Image (spheres, grey):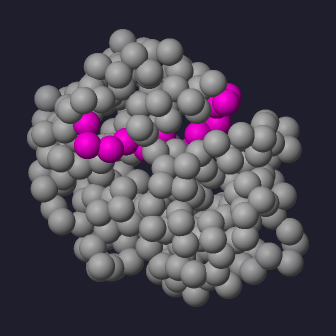
């Protein structure tokens, strides 16, 4: 086993974990995933993420945000709730926020407004921002550019784009989160060719559990997933894929991604 890992994106409040959440967190810890950032993706979800983080001090931390899918549900109260969450010491970032023009569950103009509002909240609360992007690169880039000077730090989580898109973000001094998408031979293997471009102090890893179960997870990986549900204990498999793609030892990628996550989120010692 490598040194301690940090899963920077775990949707642990998802109802897929309702029956065995504690066991899932214990399994992650037993597999070296010592720290997990619980994604807040809606007003309620952000409150739940904070509550969960409070019950696992030193292991779980939370983000507070509204995913672009839910942008249409944002009311005038939502931002003040997120702002209150952001003041809690367990909340280490604003987000998940961003743009998703692939599913278009919320109208695009609403997604853009709610994204900009959350970038402003991140700047006001001096927290880094955890960002989601799918099929909206140009608008995403334009909005982030407008706010970049005021932003503390930002990560494009679950990066799935091209090398040119990657460099657009590195040029803005943003961080990059890599998920098990890189393990998907149908749509994610292109990432293997250029994730070596990402400097060590910009690269972090995540499961995005319960989503994105790595497609190539070996039958002897311990633990085996329950059905198609991903879980943070599977992060070492993502680590191994990143290490393989960059030609570096697992141990080195573990140490560097963990150090980068600790710095990015200002995780307390
Ligand atoms: Zn996402």
Magenta segment boundaries in residue numbering: 151-163
Of residue 12 and residue 3, the one placed in the foreground of this image is: 3
Residue 105 or residue 165, whichever sits in front? 165
The image position of residue 65, as x and y in percent, is 31, 43
- Marks counted in the figure total 0
Which quarter shows the N terminus?
bottom right
- Decide: is 234 above or below 200: below
Residue depicted at x 27% and y 26%: 147
Find residue 15 and report its horizontal and vertical position in percent: 49, 59
16 shown above or below 60 = above
> What residue sits 44% from the left and 21% below the top?
141
Query: Residue 20: within the magenta?
Result: no
| Quadrant where the C terminus is found in the figure | bottom left
Residue at 25%, 36% in the rendered image = 151
Q: Main secondary structure of the magenta part?
A: loop
Residue 177 visible somewhere in the drawing: no
Residue 119 point in image, percent of width and height:
26, 33
Hey, which residue is sitting farthest top in the picture?
Answer: 109
Front one among 255 and 180: 255
Residue at image point 24% right, 29% down: 149
Within the image, what quadrant is residue 164 found in? top right
Asked where in the image residue 69 lies, by quadrant, the reply is: top left
155 to the left or right of 128: right
- Do we see residue 31 in this rendering? yes
Magenta region includes residue 161: yes
In the image, residue 150 lies at what x, y percent? 20, 32
């Amino acid at each position: 086993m490598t040194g301690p890992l940090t899963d920077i994106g775990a949707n642990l409040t998802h109802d897929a974990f309702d029956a065995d959440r504690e066991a899932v967190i214990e399994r992650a810890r037993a597999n070296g995933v010592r720290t997990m950032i619980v994604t807040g993706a809606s007003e309620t979800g952000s409150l739940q993420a904070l509550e969960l983080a409070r019950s696992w001090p030193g292991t779980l931390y939370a983000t507070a945000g509204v995913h672009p899918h839910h942008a249409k549900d944002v009311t005038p109260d939502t931002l003040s709730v997120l702002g209150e969450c952001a003041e809690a010491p367990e909340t280490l970032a604003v987000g998940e926020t961003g743009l998703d023009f692939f599913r278009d569950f919320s109208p695009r103009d609403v997604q853009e407004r709610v994204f900009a509002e959350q970038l402003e909240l991140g700047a006001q609360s001096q927290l880094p921002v955890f960002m989601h992007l799918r099929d909206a690169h140009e608008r995403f880039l334009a909005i982030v550019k407008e706010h970049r000077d005021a932003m503390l730090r930002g990560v494009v989580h679950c990066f799935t784009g091209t090398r040119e898109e990657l460099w657009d973000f590195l040029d803005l001094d943003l961080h990059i989160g890599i998920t098990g998408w890189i393990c998907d031979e149908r749509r994610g293997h292109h990432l293997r060719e250029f994730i070596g471009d990402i400097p060590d102090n910009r690269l972090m890893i995540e499961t995005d559990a319960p989503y994105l179960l790595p497609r190539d997870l070996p039958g002897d990986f311990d633990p085996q997933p329950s059905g198609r549900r991903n879980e943070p204990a599977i992060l070492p498999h993502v680590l191994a894929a990143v290490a393989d793609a960059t030609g570096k030892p697992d141990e080195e990628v573990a140490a560097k991604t963990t150090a980068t996550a600790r710095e990015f989120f200002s995780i307390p010692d």
